[in-house]
Amino acid sequence: MRFWTRPALTTFCLLAAIPAATQAWVPERGEGEFSVVYQNVYTRDHLDANGAPFDVGKIRVVALIESFDLGLTDKLAVTTTVPLVAGKYNGSFPHQLPIDNGDYHGGVGDMRLALRYQLRARPVTFTPFLSVSYPTVSYQHFAHSAIGSDMWEVSLGANAGRRLDPWLPKAYVQARYAYVITQNVSVPSFHYSARPNRSRIDAELGYFLTRRLAVRGLASSQVTHGGLDASAFPPPSQTLSNDLWRHHDQISAIHYLNAGVGVSYSVNRNVDSFVAFEKTAWGENGHALNAGISAGVTWAFKMPWARRDSAYEQLAAEQRTTGWHSKPTEVKLCH
């Protein structure tokens, strides 16, 4: 099954880029992938502390994400992800101008470095990971159309997955848990200091319709440990002079559950493509993902020092006789 022999494509998560660390599989020594992903995210509703939506304007964020994943050994892999992001806001309640003036403003988003180590391969693949995300350039985080939260993060967690044979031979399931340690945010004028750490859980259920074509169901969720509810920022306090309000995107207790569907297609042995749609099913204290679309392509490669007779090549020959010629693609869309 090609899904377990190559890493899946990953995309940009609006406040935290999620790299190939979301995959249980680790490429063999000297093998890897280069991925390019386009993402278009639309937000119409903000969510209060009870999850009720309210309209203060429309936000659209587009991104082009480049990801490089390489097997250092047969069990250890390194991933780098760099997003180019642009956002715009249309509405009557801008955080500040000119960044929320209705035009696109953007730049280089937060870079992510990740290591993952495969402890177990079968029947359940189990791969812990460690990743670090940090801003590489200075950008404005206090804006509806901000390209990130301008904070570093450290994520610790594990991925697990398996094929569902013998019960459902053409299906698979995978899941990921990450505990995200965030940068401490201090607002001296309000005697406030907090580190709004988060738990994130992602899951995917897929089924191969043909050798090349797979369909997928997607789910992603977040629970923030600490932080402030939207009720801490009543409208009279939402001014540029309020230091606490200027940091609300960084310190809010944002919770959400997103759900979606996707399709992946294997063009050939070295090229895979996908498209996916996801939206918010439930959330509190943040932006609702009213519509998120991702599409991307992955190219597999081998370094000169890779094995010539790798397990991938052996499994590829088996796939041609069993029909397992495609792989799913994990998609992360959030707010």
Image: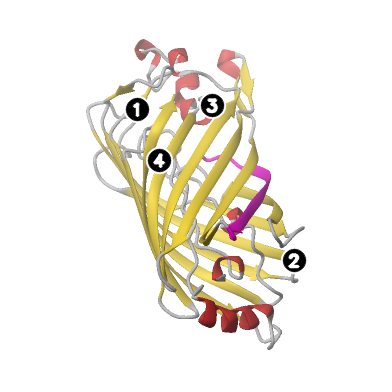
Closer-to-camera residue (318/5): 318
> Hey, which quadrant is residue 312 in on the image?
bottom right
Dot 1 or dot 3, earlier in sequence: 1
The residue segment tinted magenta is: 150-166
Q: CA distance from mark 3 to mark 4?
A: 15 Å
Q: Position of residue 135 (x, y in %)?
A: 55, 48
For label 2, the residue is 75
> Residue at image x 58%, y 38%?
200
For label 1, the residue is 46
Label 1: element kind: strand
Kindly indicate whether the residue at mark 2 contacts the one at mark 4 (C-beta within 8 angstroms): no
Q: CA distance from mark 2 to mark 3?
A: 37 Å
Q: Is 163 part of what is drawn in magenta?
A: yes
Dot 3 or dot 4, earlier in sequence: 4
For label 3, the residue is 251
Q: Is residue 202 above or below residue 263?
A: above
Give the residue type that dot 2 points to. Answer: Lys
Circle 2 packing at 10 Å, graded few (<14), some (14-19), many (20+), is some
Q: CA distance from mark 4 to mark 1?
A: 15 Å
